[in-house]
Amino acid sequence: VYNVRYCADNDCGPSYSNTLQLTVIDKPTVESISDIIPSLICAPATFSFNPPTDQPNGSSLNPATSGWQIQPIGGQWGNAPSTIQYQPDGNNVYNVRYCADNDCGPSYSNTVQITVSTAPNVTDITAPAGICEGLTLTLSQPQFTPSDATGCWQVFLDGIWQDITGNSIPSISYNVY
């Protein structure tokens, strides 16, 4: 806080204006959003962003320019609603940040990258209608999306789905017993 006045002086002495009390304000401060934004959102899903704690620092926040912002990787920052219905749209990686704005200008939280993904979609596998015991069944990996998913082969034995040893290879040979 500063007190300020104007002084005019001549041979008859000084005169002073009224005294103004000035409060120094600063841009708002915003806490980190790393702990409140997930790095993966499984779609389709609705996700609600809760705002981080911010400090206006002497001036009220401007609600028109304060809030969540989202940026497709390689794209422009834009305002985001606090609740978003996510659907994969071919551009599934985004940067998210929070903007708090007052009379001194905007401040931004750290930026968090989120990925919007879905459960993999796997095409059907085919095999012969029957296979004789003691023979080897060879299966080829089906197509699946998204391509960053990992696959494995499983067999249903004794009421439980179990991974088949060597299950990370694209095709597998399995001895039927």
Image (spheres, helix red, strand yellow):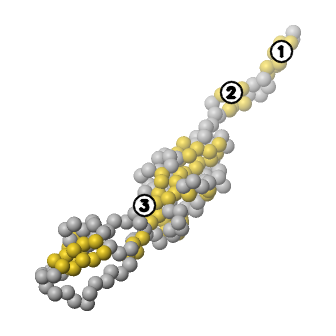
* Observer-nearest of 152 and 27: 152
Distance from label 1 to label 3 (Cα)? 68 Å
Q: Which image quadrant: the C terminus?
A: bottom left
Q: Is residue 53 visible?
A: no
Which dot marks residue 40?
Answer: 3
Label located before the other in sequence (1 or 3)? 1
**Where does residue 95 sit, x and y in percent of width and height?**
52, 54
**Where does residue 48 sit, x and y in percent of width and height?**
49, 63
User: 86 above or below 155?
Assistant: above
Q: Are marks 1 and 3 in contact (CB under 8 Å)?
A: no
User: 41 above or below 122?
Assistant: above
* Observer-nearest of 33 and 118: 118
Residue drawn at x 68%, y 27% is 3
* Observer-nearest of 144 and 62: 144
Residue drawn at x 62%, y 54% is 76
Q: Amino acid at mark 2?
A: Asn
Distance from label 3 to label 2 (Cα)? 52 Å
- Residue found farthest to the bottom: 129
Which dot marks residue 33?
Answer: none
Q: Amino acid at mark 3?
A: Leu
Q: Point out the frontmost of discs 1 and 3.
A: 3
Q: Amino acid at mark 1?
A: Asp
Which dot marks residue 3?
Answer: 2
